[in-house]
Image (cartoon, helix red, strand yellow):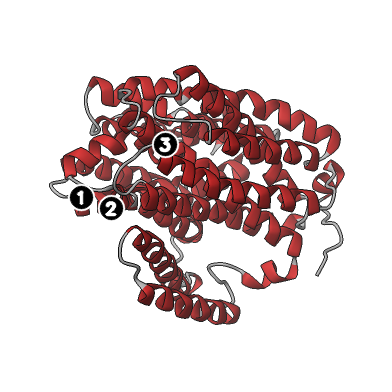
Amino acid sequence: MTQTLKKPWLLIVTVALGTLLNPLNSSMIAVALTRMQEDFNLDFTDLSWLISTFYLASAVAQPVMGKLGDMFGYKRLFLMGLILVAAASVFAPMSPSYGLLLVFRMLQAVGSSALFPSGMAMIRASITKHQAKALSVLAVFSSTSAAFGPSIGGFLIHSWDWQAIFFINFPFIIASFLLSIFVLPGGRRVHIELKRIDFGGIALFIVSIVMILLFLLSFSGHIRWWTLLVAIVAVICFYFYEKRRKEPFIDLSSLKANVNVSFIYLQFILVNLIFYTIFFGIPTFLQQAQHYNERDTGLIMLAVAGFGVVISPAAGQWIDRSGSKPPLLVGAVTILAGTAMLLTVHDDTSIWWMIVVLSVFGISNGFNNISMQTALYSFVKAEETGSASGLFMTSRYMGTILSSSLIGIFFSEKINSSHLHIIAYICLAASLLILILTIRMPGTHRQRVIKGRAPRRNN
């Protein structure tokens, strides 16, 4: 502990090397989908499960891992998470079947989901001065690794094959593991309280999401109406079950009590639905409709990453001066413009116009991500920050899961500009709803966040 306090930067680096694994692995696969589709002889509907199951596992694992860290100790859980990611990264490239690859991807998601909550807890406990700066460094590591994932993946796959996106994890895993042994604070006794984990709520949540995905993906062929019926029953059971829980998996009562926060979660779901539809759909379109190789696809996708990284600091400064609503309005307008510009993209569209279109999405992402988060904190009390952040991440995962269904439905057989335009029209409708939700949002001010006060709630 003493060493950690004397060298807080070493603690930050140790945690950051581990926490970047989840966003990195969730984004690198965007460029690998075409090669995996060829190797396992799949249509895109089946392949979309590779995206959705990773995010579903992450959505379930992150809040559970936070409670397991309280029970087993954050250092132990951090090391266990690294070991699980390492094991999944060894066996996933050797998967003899697509089913096993899905299993190893889910294990990778669970292991990497253990790293963020335990790492955050150790930093908050060990670094008392300039804590916000330390947490912002972690955020930069995570956002940068996610943004540049397709570009990194593109170079790796072009030089070798899709298996390389798993092996690239090991330098980060080994460095973080060795540093963790000597740097991370330990000493917490094991205190198991399994009743704190809402197993029933988790099971109903998983059934609900899987049935909704099965129903949506069935639109590419024969519609499975029975999955919709099961999903409705599971959602109703989930609602009444969670209301009775002392520590529910998702606190539905708080969502009902604070309408502004609920609308922010809905808006963030829509933002991520659009962004990840582009993030995962465009690399596949570039490779299969425009016949770019993996390396060039990764370079083109830098337009999204580069503008997002550049815009985020400027958006943060603007929020400090004017609150989160003005940048959110810019984010809503630019994501609307980007989806409209997708309608101008065709199979023979030039690389330069593709870069312009993707740059607009990068700009919108730079404004939307940080603005949505600060808007959320302005509507919750200081003591509710932890649970609100957890639901915020769940909203991100929900949007991403829905995006995988969208591209799975319309890219199921042949990928061309006509299918891309159908997706664009759906995203355009979602963009209009984002703009409406942004306009209705009450004004937010930095003082509310600093003082830890929430504005008057509109029930």
Which percent across, then down, holds residue 93?
A: 20, 39
Which percent across, then down, holds residue 391?
A: 59, 58
Question: Above or below — where is 458 with respect to 42?
Answer: below
Find numbered disc 2 in the image and state the secondary structure of the residue it sits on.
helix
Q: In this view, does 316 lie to the left or right of 357?
A: right
Q: Which of marks 2 and 1 is in front?
A: 2
Q: How many marks?
A: 3
Which mark is drawn over residue 50?
none
Residue 40 figure quarter: top left
Q: Name the residue under label 1.
A: 98
Residue at the outermost top position? 352
Q: Nearer the viewer, mark 3 or mark 2?
A: 3
Q: Name the residue under label 2.
A: 46
**Disc 3 versus disc 1: distance between alpha carbons?**
28 Å
Image quadrant holding the N terminus, namely top right
Which callout, 3 or 1, points at the residue further toward the start of the chain? 1
Which callout, 2 or 1, points at the residue further toward the start of the chain? 2
Which percent across, then down, holds residue 136?
A: 63, 34
Q: Name the residue under label 3.
A: 417
Q: What residue type is labelled 1?
A: Tyr
Residue at the image position 68 percent from the left and 61 percent from the top: 262
Image quadrant holding the C terminus, namely bottom right
Q: Is residue 393 visible?
A: yes
Q: What residue type is labelled 3?
A: Ser
Q: Is residue 110 visible?
A: no
Which callout, 3 or 2, points at the residue further toward the start of the chain? 2
- Marks 2,1: beta carbons within 8 A: yes
Q: In this view, does 97 lie to the left or right of 212?
A: left
Residue at the image position 82 percent from the left and 56 percent from the top: 454
